[in-house]
Image (cartoon, rainbow, N blue to C red):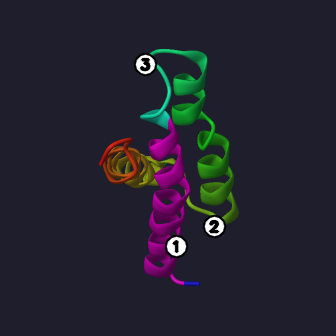
Amino acid sequence: MILFQKAVLLAVSVFLLNLPFGAWRVRVPNRSLRWFLAIHLPIPFLFWMRTWLGMDARWILLSLAFAITAQYLGGRWFAPGS
């Protein structure tokens, strides 16, 4: 698999994984244990995915950007009352 394909696979996987966690995050009280878990539970998967694809630490910023974006959009799209 070429590097571009790996980067796209990583970005899409991270984004799709974090969407439901963002939706969960907006439904729980801020700064609670569940809120903390909604943000941090996907991190081991991100590490595993990056390692499995053979991508080094330089790609953390890409996965972080997609994770934050998905958390935000998941919270906006699936927020209660929206």
Q: Identity of the amino acid at label 1? A: Leu
Residue 21's spot in the image, x, y percent?
53, 44
Indicate which label's residue lies in the foreground, 3 or 2. Answer: 3
- The CA distance from mark 3 to mark 1 is 31 Å
Where, quadrant-wise, is the N terminus in this rendering? bottom right
The residue lying at 29 percent from left, 49 percent from top is: 82
The outermost residue toward the bottom is 1
Q: Are marks 3 and 2 in contact (CB under 8 Å)?
A: no
Label placed on residue 53: 2
Residue 54's spot in the image, x, y percent?
63, 64
Task: Answer with left or right where residue 64 lies relative to residue 76.
Answer: right
Q: Are marks 2 and 1 in contact (CB under 8 Å)?
A: yes
- Which element carries disc 3, helix, strand or loop? loop
- Which element carries disc 2, helix, strand or loop? loop
Q: Would you call the spot at circle 1 few (<14 residues within 10 Å), some (14-19), or many (20 or more)?
A: some
- The CA distance from mark 3 to mark 2 is 34 Å
Give the number of callouts: 3
Asked if residue 64 is among those painted magenta in the image, a careful observer would answer no
Q: Identity of the amino acid at label 2? A: Leu
Q: Earlier in the sequence, mark 2 or mark 1?
A: 1
In the image, the segment drawn in magenta is 2-24
